[in-house]
Image (cartoon, coloured by chain):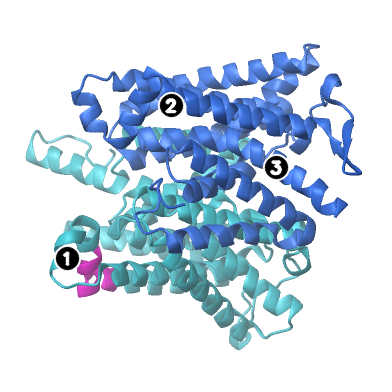
Chain colours: A blue, B cyan
Amino acid sequence: MRFWLVQSLNGLALGGLLFLLSSGFSLIFGLMRVANLTHGAYFMLGAYVGLSVLEAGHGFFAAVVAGALAIAVLGGIIERVLLRRLAGRTLAQVLVTLGIAFIISDSTLLVWSGDPMPLPVPAALQGGVRAFGVFFPKYRLAVVIIAVVAAVLLLLLLERTRIGAMIRAGVDDMDMARALGIPVPRLFTAVFCLGAALAGMGGVLGGPILSVYPGLDMDMLPLALIVLILGGAGSIGGAFAASMVIGFLYTFGQVLFPSLAYVILFLPMVVAIALKPKGLFSADAA
Amino acid sequence: MKRAALLALALAVLVAPAILPWDFYVNIATQVLIAAIFALSLNLLVGYGGLISLGHGAFLGASAYAVIFLTTRAGMAQLPAAACAVVFATFLAALFGPIALRASGLGFLMITLALGQIMWGVAYRWVEVTGGDNGLSGFTRPQPFGLDLSSPHAFYVLALLVFGCSFAFIALLVHSPFGAGLRGVRDQPRRLRALGFDTWLIRYAAFVIAAFWAAVAGVLWAYYNQFVSPHVLSLTNSAEVLLMVIAGGAGTLFGPVAGAVIVVLLKNVASAYVTRWMMLLGIVFVVIVVFMPEGLVPGLARLRRRSTGGVARPRTEGA
């Protein structure tokens, strides 16, 4: 029982991190039809930036903000300089994002060397909470809460604000949105920066749990892809539910069948692909 | 006339490494041939089928792992092991196909990427079978009919023969009615469906055939390196072969071969000077996609047409 409770929390925490990573990925794909293969690299780079900020003696909150901001700026530049130039050529865009992912991946190796480095847990969140006779690490609880808050804020942004309405219009029917005078290019940049910032923030928050190492980017990217396939493009609720499912499966898979944890991820993907009636990335019918 | 001269030149270039004394260059030529078979197979999907796969390394890797596992761990003889490895990887493609082909375009790319990464994860984590990060070693090249393939020259000849077979097969396939159907599925899937073609089946067949030749390349790859590690299944490897196809020219017969020459040379030359192959790969990727999306072979053909049609340039071949 204790085992299941503790691992469930671990699954939720991983799910929360996955949500931060893949909600942006899903929004970008939903709105812009860009499969941003740089997203895993954003997550890793965010963690490294956070690490450097921490090592410079600043607090954990500063590290999270710096990670998110740095990646948002980087994402904005990539969108403006490269992706915009290839507008309308979706496959070329994917390949460019892949190339950039390699460049970022190799650059981090150059700057931060190849050793895995854990980010320290912030002092206020060290230790744990005792409940049901089980010891829950505070930090993981905090990650889950942050992910839920982020999901609620994103939902509010999309459902209750003017910008959100524009984004939803763009996801549903880009041409019509354009014809109605919605500034689609600016919207693209905004969403891309937002998605990148979420990934960067996820990277820093994930640091104390996953630590940061070369290859973290390629570990996270397929998880984001699977969440997108499961949750549907541009759907925050779908991304949240799918992240939690994948977080659970991956955590229990790693504990119960460590050598085949990756294959277990394969199952929900196959089921989702087999069952989806209306196109793979449609948001309806999870 | 000019065509015959070009053909003779190509043959001379292909045969030369079998005679020349420099082992280092012979080995690079062998690497080029193996990469070319791999790229030719992917070109069936990317160039003729319009299906961009980022998981093609899965089939080369699966077959390389299988042949080494079967000979060193399961004690199988060389030839049956090679055959089993190819069958295994092709069978894997028969399983993956229905999943990946639920989508085309971006969806196909993302699913193949996810499938490829899952294969990588299996190779990395399933230590009992794959040796984990250390990979599998202790493998030697076969000695069919008493021929010693451990010499670079003999092995080059073997690679050349297999390359010839694969090139001829793919050239025939592309010009067959099936090839026409595949191009039709790429360009006009709706029209083809209306004409009564089973577009899904055509794509599926192309997927499995491409995996078969990737598996053949995988066996050669295993013989050449005599070692396999999860790196062969990494996204970098799948991206490299995609770069060969795109850089050379997708949908042309010679494009992937030219791409294989460029990427293998770049990798070998660059690694002598810089250790940052991955960064270079990324930069080349971005540059090619942004500035030369059609690839080298069609790009040069266009240049030549322009130069012969318009003002005659003094040095057309040097372009």
CA gap between label 3 and label 1 equals 47 Å
Q: Report which residue position mark 2 lands on.
A: A158
The residue indicated by pointer 1 is B192
Q: Residues within 10 Å of mark 1 (few under 14, many from 20)?
A: some
Asked where in the image residue B290 lies, by quadrant, the reply is top left
Q: Which residue is mark 3?
A: A12
Q: Nearer the viewer, residue A108 or A270?
A: A270
User: For the residue labelled by badge 2, is the local secondary structure a helix, a strand or a loop?
Assistant: helix
Q: Magenta span covers which residues?
A: B171-182
C-alpha span from label 3 to label 2: 24 Å
Q: Position of residue B287 (x, y in %)?
A: 40, 33
Q: Amino acid at mark 3?
A: Leu
Residue nearest the observer in this picture, A100 or A262? A262
Q: Is B233 rendered above or below residue B177?
A: above
- Please identify the quarter of the rendering in which residue A165 is found: top left
Q: SS of the residue at dot 3?
A: helix
Residue B50 placement (x, y as % from top left): 30, 55
Which residue is pictured at 87% across the width and 43% down the height? A132
Disc 2 packing (10 Å; few <14; some 14–19; many ≥20): some
| Labels 3 and 2 positioned on one and the same chain | yes
